[in-house]
Image (tube, rainbow, N blue to C red):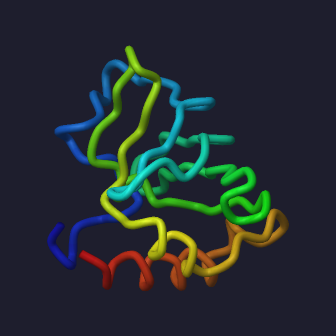
Amino acid sequence: MQPNENLWSYRQDVHDPNGIVDVTGYAVEATDGKIGSVDESTYEVGDSYVVVDTGPWIFGQKVVLPAGTITQIDPQGQRVFVSRTKEEIKNAPKYDETTFKDPAYRDELGGYYGGKR
């Protein structure tokens, strides 16, 4: 991923803008294993993300992953693959249901994931 690439948009090779696949409920696979399932997904141009319920893996917490971290969507297997490790996701800025849509949090999250390759 190029540093200037928009993390908040789905990559063209994993998402067909004309045929949106709702990934809510899909399993989420990091580069080193399953991290949870999609609790919420959005498809706004330049402002897309998934909220992942990590279940017992991070003590029932949720994490936000910018759409640009998604490398593959498997509708048949109902799985979403992301280009980050479990550890990178675990160490991301904490999710807060009341503030995760705030620009400051999004900037912090974008800075965190934008610096990872």
Q: Which residue of the protein is positioned furthest toward the top in this rendering?
A: 76
Q: Quick one: 45 or 34, which is closer to the camera?
A: 34
Location of residue 33 in the rendering, given as x and y in whole percent from the top left corner: 42, 52
Going by the image, does 12 lie left or right of 49? left
Q: Along the horizontal axis of the image, is 27 left or right of 102? A: left
Q: Is residue 86 left or right of residue 115?
A: right
At 66% from the left edge and 59% from the top edge, which residue is drawn? 57
Assign the N terminus to one quadrant of the image.
Answer: bottom left
Asked if residue 6 is positioned above or below residue 34 in the image, the reply reads below
Which image quarter: residue 112?
A: bottom left
Residue 22's spot in the image, x, y percent?
A: 52, 25
How many numbered tags mark residues here?
Answer: 0
Q: Residue at x 41, y 47 (%)?
A: 45
Residue at the (48%, 51%) spot, across then down: 48
66 or 84: which is nearer to us?
Answer: 84
Residue at position x 69%, y 50% in the image: 53
**Quick one: quadrant of the C terminus?**
bottom left
Which residue ends up furthest to the right in the rendered image?
Answer: 98
In the image, residue 72 lies at what x, y percent?
Answer: 29, 39
User: Residue 9 location, x and y as percent?
Assistant: 36, 53
Vertical placement of 116 versus 85: above or below? below
